[in-house]
Amino acid sequence: MAREEHDRELWERLRQGDAETFGAFYRQHAARLQAFLRRYLGDAKAAEDVAQEAFLQLWRRPNGFNPAGATLRAYLFGIAAKRAADWWRHRAREERSAASWQVGLRSEAPTLMEDALARLEPQPRSLLWLREVEGYSCAELAAMLDIPPGTVKSRLFTAREQLRRIWSGGRP
Amino acid sequence: MNCEEVQPFVSALHDGESVSREVAEHIRNCPACRARLEDYARMGVELRLLASNAEEEAPTRLPHLPPLSRLWGRSLTARVLVPRFALGAGLFAILGLSVGLGWMHAQVAGLWFQFNVTSPDRMGSWGNQVQAGYRGKPAVITRVHVSGEPKEILAAIVDVDEVQYQLVRLSIRTRRFEVAPAAGPEGRPTQESVEVRPTFEEMERQMLASTTPHKYEYIPGQVLEIPVEGGGKLLLTGRVLDRRARFWAEDYPLEPKPNQIVLAEPALVRDKELLIKGVGSASAQGEGSYAAIFVPNEGLFGFLLKPIEGAVEAEAEYGQARFKIGEHDYVLFSATPITGGQQPRGIWVYRDPTYKPGPIGTIGSGSDFLKVIKGAEK
C-alpha cells in the first residue's frame, strides 16, 4: 500500500476514535519519538511528558493532519518538536541560567559526538537529529516545523557548523 | 567563489540537493570545503551510531485516551477541567469529532458540501455548508482599505448544482466592484463594515443581470482558483460530508502567531450560561488586530491584542480566555488557540452593549477596533 494511502487509512481510523489503531501507532513510534525528545530536552521525564502530550494531541485533534502533505509520523514529530520548543521557552523563562552549558563552543580537544551534541543549543540539536537520524528531508522539516525550506537549510548549515566546531575541538 | 560563499552549499550538497557547476567545481578543488563535506558526512554517521547505540527504551505508558464523544459534556459541566493540552481542541473535540464518523458509508443523497472562499492574500474569507441545489446569495471578500488603494470588493455568488464524494459541480458568478465608503472616507470601510456603495443588494442585482455563471467541476480537497470578472481571483476549498458538520478546522491557524488573534467557532459562557456558540470564524494578524463576536441582547465583544480604553484584561490560554466584566465571569472558548506565543497571555476584551451588527453577521475581525465602535455610535 502506498505510504499516502496507508497514512490516510490510519488517519481515518484515528479520526473515528479507533483506540486499537492508536495503540499500535503509539507502540510503533513512541520509543523513537522519546529518543528524539530526550536528545532535544536533555531530560528524560520531560521527554516522556512531551511525547505523551504529542500523542494525545494527535488523538484529540487528528484533523490537523493533512494526508496529502507529510506522513502521520512526521506530523507527530512536528507536534512534539513544537511542544518541546515550548518546553524550552517555559524553562528558559523560569531558569535563565539553564543555558549556561551552551557556552564554550571552542574547546581545546576534540569531543565525543555525544558530548558535542549535548553542548549544542536545543534547537539546532533537534534539527540535526531530525535530519540525520530520523532522515526527514528539508521539505518535510519545513512542513513539520512551519518554517520555510530556505530557513531549514540555513539552520541546518548553522547547526552543522556549530557541531563541527565543538566536535573537532575548534578546528576550522 | 570563495570558501565562505560556498559553505552553505556544502551543507545543501550533504543533504542531497543539487548545486551549481561553479560550486561543485570549487568543492572539488578546495581541500577545506572537501574536508567540511567529509566532516558533515562523518557527523551524520556518528549521530546515527549514537542513536543506534542508545538503549532504546520500551514505550512508556500508553496515554490514557479520553473518550472523545464525552468531552463536550465534561468540559461544559466542569469548565476548568479542560486539560491544558486539550488547548483549543476542547470545542473542536466537542463539536466536531462527530463529523468524521462513518461518513464513508453514507448515502450520496444527503451529502453536504462545506466550502470556504478566500482571496489569495487572505484579506477575508467566508464559507458555508450546503447541499446540492443551494442557490447562493452574493458573498463578498472585502478589499476595502481605509486609506489608500485598492478600494474594492470581490464578490461571488456560488450555486451548488451537484454534490458527490469525489466531485462537486458549481456555478459561480464573480465580479469585482470598486467601492466607496458610504459614510465618507473615514467611515467604516473595513471588513466588518457594510456601509459601502454599491450596496449588497445592488451588487446582487448587477451580478444576476450582467454576469455569466461559470461552471466548475470541483474535486474536494483541491484549491479551485476562480478568476473574478473585472480583475483578481478567489480561491475556493471545500470538502464533502455525509452530515452537516458542526465545525471546520482546516481554515483556522492551529498554531496562531503571537500577533494573530483567532476565533474559531467561538462559544461565550457567562457565569454558567452559554451565551452563544459556534458562530463561524474570524482571524486577524498584526499588532492592532482584533476579532469580535456579536451576542444578541448583550452587544459586541471585541477581543484585542492591545488594550484600548475601557477594555478589561483576559487571560488567554490556548483555546480559552477568561475575563470578568462587572460582576460576571466570562469564558470564551475557541476551537483553536486564540493567539500564539507564550501561554497563558493577556489579551483585552471590550464590550459594547449598544453595538448593532450589519448584515454580515455576528463575527468579524480586522485591524482597527476603535473604528468599529465609532461606526456603531453613528
Image (cartoon, rainbow, N blue to C red):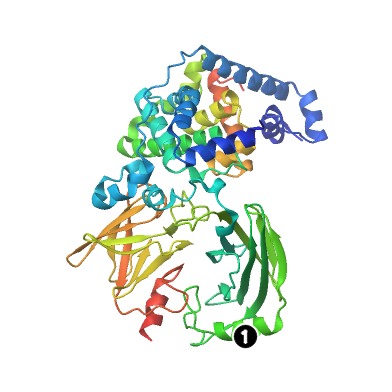
Which of the 4 image quadrants contains residue B297? bottom left
Instruction: Establish if B299 lies above or below A159.
Output: below
User: Residue shown at 57%/37% (left/top)?
Assistant: A9
Q: Is mark 1 on a helix, strand or loop?
A: helix
Looking at the picture, how far across and down is residue B184, in whole percent?
A: 50, 87
Looking at the picture, how far across and down is residue B211, in whole percent?
A: 70, 79
Instruction: Establish if B273 lies above or below A56.
Output: below
User: Would you say B124 lies left or right of B170 here?
Assistant: left
Looking at the picture, how far across and down is residue B68, in whole percent?
A: 38, 43
User: Would you say B274 lies left or right of A105 here?
Assistant: left
Task: Give the amino acid at mark 1.
Answer: Arg
Q: Which of A145 and A18 is in front in this view?
A: A18
User: Residue shown at 65%/53% (left/top)?
Assistant: B222
Instruction: Establish if B161 lies above or below A104.
Output: below
Looking at the picture, how far across and down is residue B52, in whole percent?
A: 54, 14
Q: Mark 1 lies on which chain?
A: B
Please state, as top left, top right, bottom left or bottom right, where the C terminus of chain B lies in the image: bottom left
Q: Which of A74 and B184 is in front in this view?
A: A74
User: Residue shown at 26%/51% (left/top)?
Assistant: B79
User: In the rendered image, is residue B199 in sight?
Assistant: no
Q: Which of A155 and B15 is in front in this view?
A: B15
Which of the 4 image quadrants contains residue B298? bottom left
User: Residue shown at 49%/53% (left/top)?
Assistant: B249
User: Would you say B197 lies left or right of B224 here?
Assistant: left
User: In the rendered image, is residue B321 in sight?
Assistant: yes
For the residue carrying disc 1, how many other residues have a C-alpha within 10 Å: few (<14), some (14-19), or many (20+)?
Answer: few
Which of the 4 image quadrants contains residue B11? top right
Q: Which of A53 and A5 is in front in this view?
A: A5
Instruction: Find disc 1 in the rendering and name its residue.
Output: B205
